[in-house]
């Protein structure tokens, strides 16, 4: 049901699942800097192997793995074509490979970290800001809601497309976009109402 | 958890007017202290508005709504802590990805420690027979299970009053009966807005709403007869 590259926790026990979320986030950050700082196809290949290993360790296997790869392909194919045409196919491989490695590593973090753990970590990391009047719980909640909304909006997009298709309007951009925007806003409103009703963020 | 009747819900000339100037709820004065009050009436008659006034999701444009000593405008946050709210569509209410995490979200305020919070959440799930689904994604639950979970998350914080806005509208007969049984068995005072007349009949008192006013208030059987007659006319 959830077909997002992010926001999909996979229930299992593995080395990445046991690691503290703060450590995983820091690791991801360091990896991102390293990938950007290094150049050349050898480093890209190493990063890719690392990304694949992390994803597999986190439990992103089979269909879950291909779901992430398919999502990226939408960007990867045109990006590779453009890079290959403008700077050579080796450069194309580096750009697309680096990005894919990072997406795999990021997906490994979300697949192995529960939303609540992420929430606790963000709230903990922001604690120093609490002194300046920042409501850290609320900021953490905003993060988790943003992650949660990605699959929700994709679900809405699919439903809207189905509705357009049922009326033979699948080629009509307006029939697909307008209801999606309206329903996204209405969903946000409902979520806000539910949060208020549950006394969260009061 | 407080015993029923100790926190009467009081509507004191409360009225709601839409920004366009349409009267959604005409000035209403009521005191609800029965263990279970049901509210019936046509679509768009103002039932949901009445329900949302109780926990301050909607504020009255004039008059006041009080739950015990708390005023829904002045003490909004405290009112929402005292009054749990269950929506028609549980999907809108369930926020976190897994079942247990959604309960934990409600418990964040009362349980600072992650371990204690998890234990409390598990206890809440056990009470409603949902413990086996703790690690499941909320999307994989059936409609009945989702509504049960929505009620479990709301009750996990032990509110004094539970307001439910058409909680059985999306459910099949079996699940409607189950949710109805659950609502009636709670120690909390329950206010339920419903089109399910069987459920409405099981309350201690029933309000019939039409065009933004309470047109009948009394015994459930008489109220339902009044509502049926108003439709037949």
Image: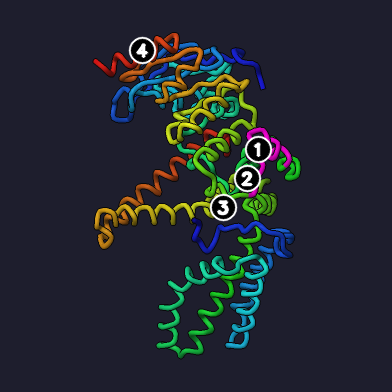
Q: Residue B127's image quarter?
A: top right
Using the image, name the chain to which the residue with label 4 belongs: B
Name the quadrant of the C terminus of chain A. Answer: top right
Q: How crowded is mark 4: few (under 14 residues within 10 Å), some or many (20 or more)?
A: few
Q: Residues within 10 Å of mark 2 (few under 14, many from 20)?
A: some
Which of pointers 4 and 3 indicates the residue nearer the eye?
A: 4
Q: Residues within 10 Å of mark 3 (few under 14, many from 20)?
A: some
Residue at the (25%, 53%) spot, across then down:
A167
Image location of residue A144, percent across then percent down:
57, 51
**Residue for badge 3:** A143
Secondary structure of the residue carrying tag 4 is helix
Question: Would residue B126 be counted in the magenta stretch?
Answer: yes
The residue depicted at 49 percent of the width and 17 percent of the height is B202
Q: Is residue A120 magenta?
A: no
Residue A122 vs residue B155, the one in the foreground: B155
Query: Is residue B8 in sight in this rendering?
Result: yes
Q: Mark 4 points at which residue?
A: B225
Picture disc at residue B125: 1
Q: Give the range drawn in magenta.
A: B119-135
Q: In this view, does A164 lie to the left or right of A107?
A: left
């Amino acid at each position: 049901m959830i077909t997002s590259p992010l926001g999909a926790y996979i229930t299992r026990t593995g080395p990445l699942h046991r690691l503290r979320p703060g450590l995983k986030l820091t690791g991801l950050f360091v990896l991102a800097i390293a990938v950007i700082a290094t150049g050349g196809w050898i480093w890209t290949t190493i990063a890719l192997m690392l990304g694949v290993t992390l994803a597999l360790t986190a439990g992103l296997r089979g269909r879950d793995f291909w779901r992430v790869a398919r999502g990226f392909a939408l960007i990867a194919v045109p990006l590779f074509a453009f890079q290959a045409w403008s700077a050579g196919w080796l450069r194309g491989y580096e750009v697309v490979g680096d990005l894919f490695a990072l997406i795999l590593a990021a997906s490994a973090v979300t697949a192995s970290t529960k939303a609540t753990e992420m929430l606790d970590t963000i709230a903990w990391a922001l604690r120093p800001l609490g002194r300046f009047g920042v409501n850290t719980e609320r900021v953490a909640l905003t993060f988790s809601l943003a992650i949660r909304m990605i699959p929700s909006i994709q679900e809405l997009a699919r439903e809207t497309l189905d509705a357009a298709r049922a009326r033979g309007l699948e080629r009509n951009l307006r029939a697909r976009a307008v209801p999606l925007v309206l329903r996204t806003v209405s969903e946000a409103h409902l979520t806000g109402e539910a949060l208020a009703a549950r006394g969260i963020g009061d | 958890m407080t015993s029923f009747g100790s926190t009467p819900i009081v509507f004191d000339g409360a009225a709601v007017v839409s920004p366009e100037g349409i009267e959604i709820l005409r000035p209403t004065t009521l005191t609800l202290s029965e263990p279970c009050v049901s509210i019936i009436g046509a679509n768009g008659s103002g039932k949901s508005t009445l329900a949302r006034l109780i926990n301050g999701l909607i504020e009255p444009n004039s008059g006041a709504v009080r739950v015990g000593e708390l005023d829904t405008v002045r003490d909004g946050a405290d009112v929402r802590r005292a009054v749990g709210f269950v929506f028609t569509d549980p999907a809108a209410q369930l926020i976190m990805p897994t079942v247990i995490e959604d309960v934990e979200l409600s418990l964040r305020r009362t349980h600072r420690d992650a371990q204690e919070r998890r234990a409390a959440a598990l206890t809440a799930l056990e009470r409603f027979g949902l413990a086996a689904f703790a690690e499941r994604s909320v999307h994989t639950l059936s409609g009945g299970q989702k509504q049960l979970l929505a009620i479990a998350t709301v009750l996990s914080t032990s509110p004094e009053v539970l307001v439910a806005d058409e909680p059985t509208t999306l459910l099949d007969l079996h699940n409607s009966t189950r949710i109805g049984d659950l609502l009636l068995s709670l120690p909390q005072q329950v206010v339920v807005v419903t089109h399910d007349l069987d459920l409405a009949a099981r309350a201690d008192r029933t309000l019939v709403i039409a065009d933004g006013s309470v047109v009948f208030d009394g015994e459930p059987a008489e109220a339902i007869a009044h509502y049926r007659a108003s439709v037949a006319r």
